[in-house]
């Protein structure tokens, strides 16, 4: 678990140490979500010499227009997300974007029983669906937020940048799609942006850059300066904005390649989207009116606002006219030993003049350049066999040389190289896929065995197919495969990796899946023997098998494939491992497998980060469990699960808990459900309205999730629950019929 010292702002909002938004002094240790690796990336900046077209739009930025936006937002008196006037501000922003010709929509979401809206305005690209985005949060707060929260700097300033940028760029004929978003719910914990980023993630939205602006209007000296932050994956984005600022503005930019979850950039960055956060650089002085009723327009610097907006307009205009990196790049080996072939997809921009290929024999060091016309393939000869060559590609048009691709490599060989192979469980079969990225391959030999160290049987000879379904399998058996490639000169490659899989048959009964960490045996921290004995006792009269996470080093679909029902328990809160096998579990469910899943902080174990969670309809958590929101009770407050639909009440076993728990469970999850059935409700000792009577377990089709660890429930109650679940799954009836037939 990765840990950083953080500041606790509220029960649901945490900030990393050094977070610049606020003067908080209460610290605690909490898990910290590492950002995902990039979904998409640019790897080198385009030719950013002065461009008169970009400058013509930069010069349209108008301070009076910016301040008109600021004063109008301030005049709502409060844009606190809970206040009705925030809905009015959403409508005002919607109308502004619409008046400029943007395709504008509300993006509604629910939070604590409220429906709030983000405002999303889109200018569709002429030739490409690549999306470049400018964002800010429209909402604000103060010490008296329902009555007065002018929110000029935080974050009228960022919202004004978004609006003025949209106004200026409305007439730019851009190849790519521009999107301008104003979020609500930022001050409650990045709620609106989290919902939208989750939506973007689940539909694989092609967000190529997201520029966030939060507090960009104040300076305590004469310097017009800002800090622009991103993480280690996207330094190019900060460098790009800085280059635009240097070329077209008087702005001083302090780049930073580390950041914190203090603004709306974070939900995007954490999901792997290229994102930056621009914020005023106030030297040693924090904005003195932060989150107060004195955060008014008069405290802001018009010159700073103008220059920040100019930088944003220049950055977006550049995204609109410079070619994106070439994609679909393949480096292929003809098998001659002295040449390589490079292929790529045509760029989406219609004004591409040609492409440039950079080549070298060490990574990042390119000694040869090939300037090409508007083609998508080149053969490069006179190469040294066995030497690895490195390549990057750029497209260029009349505006200049575009962004570079990521680096690719290839090695010319005369003998076929080791083939790629993938082996996966499938329905009553094994799926095998193989490929060799060479142009002179005449076929493949595929081999199979039931043990990795025994003689392999050749089951395909010189086949040109690269996908094979092996139906000659039996339930519960593991099969091993490898492949060879043969070229037109009958040269044979070295064998591929040897990989294995078990067919999905769902006919071997119940599997208890032990993901619970081996504890010390004290109350609250059961050891393996205690946990195994408990779960064995729940189905002692039913044959079953068991697997253990620590013993196997993890789970995959082959471990689950033969079994009809999985009973998964993760009944410790120190090491949640569900994120390592959730994709395989999802595949198992799609094949028709049935699951009972219990544990401490299960959703957190899958998703990471901190509560609360919000899941769009396409998110796997929503699709698997029917959960659209998840919260965690911070206290030892859970007395029992109140059963619904004939499920028995589940009472806490106080003897299994530490003395400080006072017989009540802690860290229990509650859910807001979408299309699943609540089967247990949270019985709160303190009658906490956020949790009392809320679903804490649900059933969606043949998947049951408990937001609490079953081990800490009284044994008889737990046994009755399992029996009821197996009845619902149709399993008890099937067993009884089988027994009756055998009598």
Image (tube, rainbow, N blue to C red):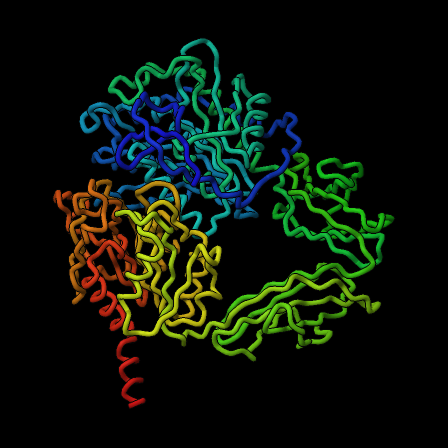
The quadrant in which residue 719 appears is bottom left
Q: Is residue 590 above or below residue 657?
A: below
Q: Residue furthest right?
A: 382
Q: Position of residue 398 (x, y in %)?
A: 68, 37
* Quarter the C terminus occupies: bottom left
Pick the residue in front: 485 or 557: 557
Q: Position of residue 611 (x, y in %)?
A: 31, 42
> From this viewpoint, is residue 71 visible?
no
> From this viewpoint, is residue 106 visible?
yes
Q: Is residue 637 left or right of residue 195?
A: left
Q: Position of residue 219 (x, y in %)?
A: 41, 14
Pick the residue in front: 587 or 666: 666
Pick the residue in front: 741 or 431: 741
At x 54% / y 46%, what residue is drawn?
Answer: 126
Q: Position of residue 689 (x, y in %)?
A: 15, 44
The quadrant in which residue 32 appears is top left
């Amino acid at each position: 678990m990765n840990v950083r010292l953080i500041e606790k702002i509220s029960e649901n909002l945490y900030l990393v140490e050094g977070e610049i938004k606020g003067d908080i002094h209460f610290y605690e240790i909490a898990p910290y979500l590492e950002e995902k690796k990039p979904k998409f990336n640019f790897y080198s900046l385009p030719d950013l010499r002065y461009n008169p077209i970009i400058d013509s739009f930069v010069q349209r930025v108008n301070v009076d227009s910016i301040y008109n936006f600021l004063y109008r937002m301030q005049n709502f008196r409060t844009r606190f997300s809970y206040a009705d006037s925030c809905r009015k501000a959403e409508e005002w922003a919607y109308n502004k974007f619409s008046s400029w010709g943007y395709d504008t929509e509300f993006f509604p979401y629910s939070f604590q029983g409220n429906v709030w809206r983000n405002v999303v305005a889109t200018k569709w690209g002429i030739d490409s669906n690549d999306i470049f985005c400018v964002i800010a949060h429209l909402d604000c707060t103060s010490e008296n937020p329902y009555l007065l929260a002018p929110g000029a700097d935080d974050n009228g300033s960022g919202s004004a940048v978004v609006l003025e940028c949209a106004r200026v760029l409305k007439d730019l004929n851009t190849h790519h799609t521009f999107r301008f978003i104003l979020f609500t719910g930022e001050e409650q914990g990045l709620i609106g942006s989290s919902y939208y980023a989750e939506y973007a993630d689940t539909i694989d939205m092609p967000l190529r850059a997201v520029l966030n602006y939060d507090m960009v209007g104040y300076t305590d000296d004469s310097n017009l300066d800002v800090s622009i932050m991103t993480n280690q994956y996207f330094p190019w984005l900060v460098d790009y904005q800085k280059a635009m600022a240097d070329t077209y503005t008087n702005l001083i930019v302090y780049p930073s390649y580390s950041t914190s979850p203090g603004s709306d950039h974070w939900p995007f960055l954490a999901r792997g989207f290229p994102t930056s956060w621009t914020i005023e650089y106030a030297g040693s002085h924090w904005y003195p009116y932060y989150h107060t009723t004195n955060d008014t327009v008069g405290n802001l610097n018009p010159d700073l606002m103008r220059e920040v907006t100019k930088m944003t307009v220049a950055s977006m205009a550049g995204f609109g006219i410079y070619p994106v990196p070439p994609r679909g790049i393949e480096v292929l080996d003809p098998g001659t030993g002295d040449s390589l072939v490079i292929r790529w997809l045509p760029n989406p921009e219609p004004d591409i003049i040609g492409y440039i290929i950079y080549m070298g024999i060490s990574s990042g060091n390119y000694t040869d350049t090939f300037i090409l016309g508007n083609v998508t393939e080149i053969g490069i000869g006179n190469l040294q066999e066995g030497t690895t060559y490195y390549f990057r590609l750029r497209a260029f048009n009349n505006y200049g040389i575009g962004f570079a691709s990521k680096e690719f490599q290839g090695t010319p060989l005369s003998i076929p190289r080791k083939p790629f192979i993938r082996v996966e469980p499938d329905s009553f079969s094994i799926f095998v896929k193989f490929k060799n990225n060479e142009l002179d391959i005449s076929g493949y030999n595929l081999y199979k065995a039931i043990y990795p160290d025994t003689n392999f049987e050749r089951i395909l000879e010189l086949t040109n197919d690269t996908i094979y379904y092996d139906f000659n399998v039996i339930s519960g058996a593991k099969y091993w495969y490898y492949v060879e490639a043969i070229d037109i000169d009958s040269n044979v490659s070295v064998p591929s990796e040897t990989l294995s899989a078990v067919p999905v048959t769902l006919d071997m009964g119940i599997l208890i899946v032990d993901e619970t960490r081996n504890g010390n045996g004290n109350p609250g921290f059961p050891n393996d023997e205690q946990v195994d004995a408990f779960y064995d006792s729940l189905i002692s009269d039913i044959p079953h098998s068991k697997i253990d996470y620590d013993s196997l080093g993890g789970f995959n679909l082959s471990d689950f494939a033969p079994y009809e029902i999985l009973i998964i328990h993760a009944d410790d809160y120190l090491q949640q491992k569900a994120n390592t096998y959730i994709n395989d579990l999802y595949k198992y469910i799609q094949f028709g497998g049935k699951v009972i899943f219990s544990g401490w902080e299960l959703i957190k174990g899958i998703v990471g980060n901190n509560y609360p969670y919000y899941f769009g309809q396409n998110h796997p958590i929503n699709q698997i469990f029917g959960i659209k929101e998840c919260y965690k009770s911070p206290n030892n407050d859970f007395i029992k699960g109140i059963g619904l639909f004939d499920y028995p009440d589940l009472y806490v076993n106080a003897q299994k808990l530490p003395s400080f728990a006072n017989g009540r469970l802690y860290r229990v999850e509650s859910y807001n459900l979408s299309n699943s059935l609540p089967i247990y409700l949270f019985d709160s000792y303190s009658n906490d309205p956020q949790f009392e009577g809320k679903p804490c377990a649900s059933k969606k089709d043949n998947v049951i999730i408990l937001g609490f660890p079953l081990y800490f429930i009284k044994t008889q109650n737990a046994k009755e629950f399992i029996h009821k679940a197996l009845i619902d799954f149709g399993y008890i009836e099937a067993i009884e019929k089988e027994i009756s037939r055998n009598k």
